[in-house]
Amino acid sequence: MTRYVKQLACRFHPEAVLIEDYRAGDMICSACGLVVGDRMIDVGSEWRTFSNDSDTKDMSRVGGAANPLFNNDNLETMMSLGTGAGAVDEFGKQKYTAGGSHKMSSADNTLRNTFDVIRQMAGRISLSNRIIHRACSIFKHSHENKCVRGRSQDVIVAACIYIACRQENAQRTIKEICAISTNASKKDIGRCFTQIIKNLPVSNQPTSVDVINLIPRFCSQLEFREEILIKKTAVHIAERAKEICDIQSRAPDSIAGASIYMACAAIGEQKRMENIQTIVGVTENTIRQIYKIMLPKASQLFPTDFQFKCLPANLPSS
């Protein structure tokens, strides 16, 4: 009896407050004890508690939320096989088995297994639940349209994660996705990616990988002393280089590596090319090629208010 409500009134004490008895469902007058209303509905939150289980964290009575990724909306009850002596006959076989109508369909079983693989693979690079859910939706759409038949599960999952990252503006390079896959090559992921996006609606087409979204993450992984300044400068260099240098056909991760390397040299931060190419995921030779293309116009690539510790004319030649 902890809640006071004035919706009803005692006919002997109209001004008295009423006490709600949760256990009995009664409204009682606080002055004379008259039961003013009975069978009251408790509109508060409904929880289940276990007196013998103090470690439980699930207090929901209604089970899990419906999952739109499955065809049956999770409304089926799955019965596990018995393990006790009463669950088997004298020949060691199960007495009680789930009937065919209660078994998960093969389509839902395939979806469930693949969703588990997506969560496991996405967890290796700490992708958000939003990206995981998007990747699951992409796989379900592709599976129902049968546009990825003949492809291995690892290749399909990697392609779905790659597309989901691009749709959610958490872009990863295809080499990063290839690294978290157990048995999928860059070429196979690219081919599967092409098959999937051909069958996606126009509104769900992934955006192209932008070097501006890659540079901040690469800089964070490289752990610069002047991380904010290098990040800002490298982004500006990459944007200007795409306008005035002949690098439009180059891969975004390669441009990001060359821009970071040039920004480090101008700021005076000593970072070896080997460290940059390890984080960026491209060969050292590729980064040097793009850097040499950008170097002749280095003076035009930096912000106007940039304070050089190493003038453009003194930047490393390679």
Image (cartoon, rainbow, N blue to C red):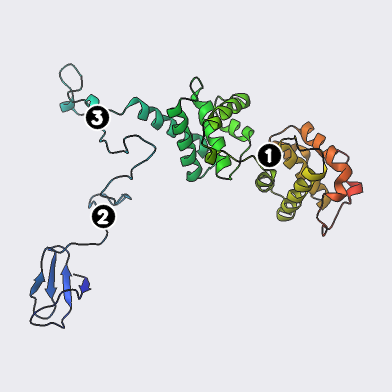
Q: Are marks 2 and 3 in contact (CB under 8 Å)?
A: no
At label 1, which amino acid type do we have? Ile
Residue at (60%, 32%) from the top-left corner? 179
Q: Could you tell which of marks 2 and 3 lies nearer the N-terminus? A: 2
Looking at the rendered structure, the secondary structure element under dot 1 is: helix
User: Around disc 3, counting alpha carbons within 10 Å, would you say few (fewer than 14), some (14 to 19), or many (20 or more)?
Assistant: few
From this viewpoint, which residue is outermost toward the right?
313
At label 2, which amino acid type do we have? Trp
Q: Which residue is mark 1?
A: 279
Is residue 261 in view? no
Image coordinates of residue 130 in percent, x first then y, are 48, 45
Image coordinates of residue 291 in percent, x first then y, are 82, 39
Image height check: is 78 above or below 224? above
**Distance from Cα at disc 2 to Cα at disc 3:** 28 Å
Q: Which mark is residue 226?
A: none
Of the 4 image quadrants, the one containing the C terminus is top right
Please state which of residues 183 and 210 is positioned toward the viewer in this rendering: 210
Image coordinates of residue 297 in percent, x first then y, are 87, 45
Looking at the rendered structure, the secondary structure element under dot 3 is: helix
Q: Could you tell which of marks 1 and 2 lies nearer the N-terminus? A: 2
Q: Which residue is mark 3?
A: 102
Residue 235 located left or right of residue 162: right
Residue at (62%, 27%) from the top-left corner? 186
Please state which of residues 113 and 265 is positioned toward the viewer in this rendering: 113
Q: Which residue is mark 2?
A: 47
* Rendered image quadrant of residue 44: bottom left
Q: Are marks 1 and 2 in contact (CB under 8 Å)?
A: no
Of the 4 image quadrants, the one containing the N terminus is bottom left
Which circle, 2 or 3, is nearer the viewer? 3
